[in-house]
Image: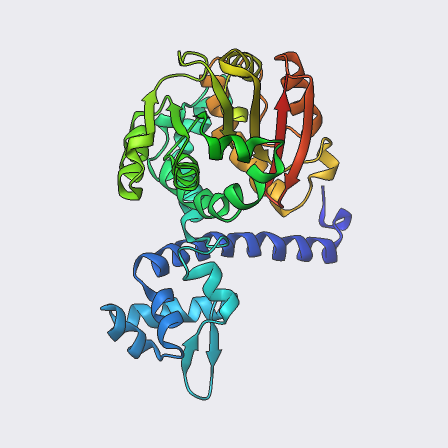
Amino acid sequence: MTMNTVDETALNAFVLRAVDHLGAGYLGVMVSLGARLGLYQALAEVGPLTSQQLADRTGCAERYVRDWASSQAAAGYVAYDAEAGTFSLTPEQALVLADEDSPVYLPPAWNTPAAMWSDEARALHAFRTGEGIAWGDHDPRLAHGTAAFYRNGYRASLVSQWLPALQDVVPALERGIAVADVGVGHGHTTVLMAEAFPNSRFHGYDTHAPSIAEARRNAREAGVQERTSFEQVSAKEYDERGFGLICFFDALHDMGDPVGVVRHAGEALTADGTLLLVEPNAADRLEDNLHIVGQTYYAASSMICTAHSIADGGELVLGAQAGPARLTQVLNEAGFSRVRVVAETPFNLIIEARR
C-alpha cells in the first residue's frame, strides 16, 4: 500500500474517529474520579462554581480540580461560563453523572473497561489458546461496576414494567410464590422483588462467592433478609423445586450450557410457572447491530461473556449479542414452547417463556 492508494479525506476522518475513542478512554478515568471525589455531586447541589470553590467544597487540591473540570468542559460533560470562570451541570448532565439513584447514572460503568484493561494479559492468553476466563478471575472492579451499572436500570423497570408485562405473574407474586434468581450477582434484582412482594420468597444462585456475600449484605441493608436466601451453586445444580417464577437477568448468555441451564429451570418450575429472561438487546444479524450499543456489547462479550461461557464448559457460547431468534431456539430446545418478547429497552430484551 502507498499513500497514492489512500483517500486522505477518509484517512483524516478515521483518525479523528479513533482519536475521539481514545479521548473517551481518557475521559472515563476522569468520570470515575469525579464521581468518587464528589465533584459532580457538588456541582449538582450548589450550582456554578470556580475550580477553587469546587476544590474547597470537596476537599481536593485546586490545581488538580482545575484540569479535571477543564477536561469535563471540553468533553461537554459540564457547562463552562467563560465570563464568570465557573463550571456547572445541566439537569440532564446531573442525572447521568451526579444522581446515584437515576436510571441513567453511568459512572460505575467505567469500572468495566478498567477491569478489561487490567485483564489484558489474561485476554491475550485466552485469544491465543481458546481457553476461557471465569467471572471470578477478572479484576474485582468488573463485578462491582457491572452490578452498580445495571442496578438502576432494574430499579426503574423491573417491578413497574417488566413483571407486569408477564402473564398472571404479578397477582401470583402478590399472593405468594417461590422465585429463583439464577446468576444473581450482587442480588439487586432479588432485593427489588422482595421489597415489592412481601408474601413471596426469593432464592438467589450464583457460582461467584464474593457476589453471594454482597447479595446477602444488600438484602440485610434493605431489610428483606428474612424472605431471601443466597446460595453459591451452579445454574444446573440447585435442588429446590416448585418455583412459580425463575429469572435470568443478563446472565444466561454467560453460561456454558444455556440449554441445560434452562432445562433445569423448567424442571424446577411449577406446571404453570414462568421463566423470565432478560438479555442484552440485539438484532439477529450482525449487520443490524453495527451501532454504539453493539460496539460496546460485542467488546464486552469478547473479554467477559464469551470468556466465561468457555470457562463454564462452552457447550454453546451465545455471547452478549445472541438475538431473539437464537434465544428462542435455546428456550424451545429446553422445552419451552411458548416464547414471546414482552418488552425491550435500548439495552435489554425482556422475554417470557412457558412450557
> Dividing the picture into quarters, in which one does residue 35 lie?
bottom left
Residue 49 drawn above or below residue 181: below
Split into 4 quadrants, where in the image is the N terminus? top right
- Is 308 on the left or on the right of 36, as rendered? right
The colour scheme used here is rainbow
Residue 289 visible, this angle: yes
Judged from this view, the residue extending furthest toward the front is 175
Q: Position of residue 44 (x, y in %)?
A: 40, 70
> Dividing the picture into quarters, in which one does residue 235 lie?
top left
- Is 282 on the left or on the right of 123, as rendered? right
Q: Position of residue 109 (x, y in %)?
A: 44, 47
Judged from this view, the residue extending furthest toward the left is 59
- Is 286 on the left or on the right of 247, as rendered? right
Total marks shown come to: 0
The residue under the point 62% across, 54% down is 17
The residue under the point 29% across, 41% down is 223
> Dividing the picture into quarters, in which one does residue 212 lie?
top left
The residue under the point 40% across, 81% down is 86
Q: Position of residue 279 (x, y in %)?
A: 57, 33
Residue 131 visible, this angle: no
Query: Looking at the image, which is closer to me, 289 or 205?
Result: 205
Split into 4 quadrants, where in the image is the C terminus? top right
Q: Position of residue 352 (x, y in %)?
A: 62, 28
Query: Looking at the image, which is closer to me, 100 or 77?
Result: 100
Residue 162 drawn above or below residue 43: above
The residue under the point 46% across, 55% down is 105
Query: Looking at the image, which is closer to me, 317 or 266?
Result: 266
Query: Looking at the image, which is closer to me, 66 or 101?
Result: 101
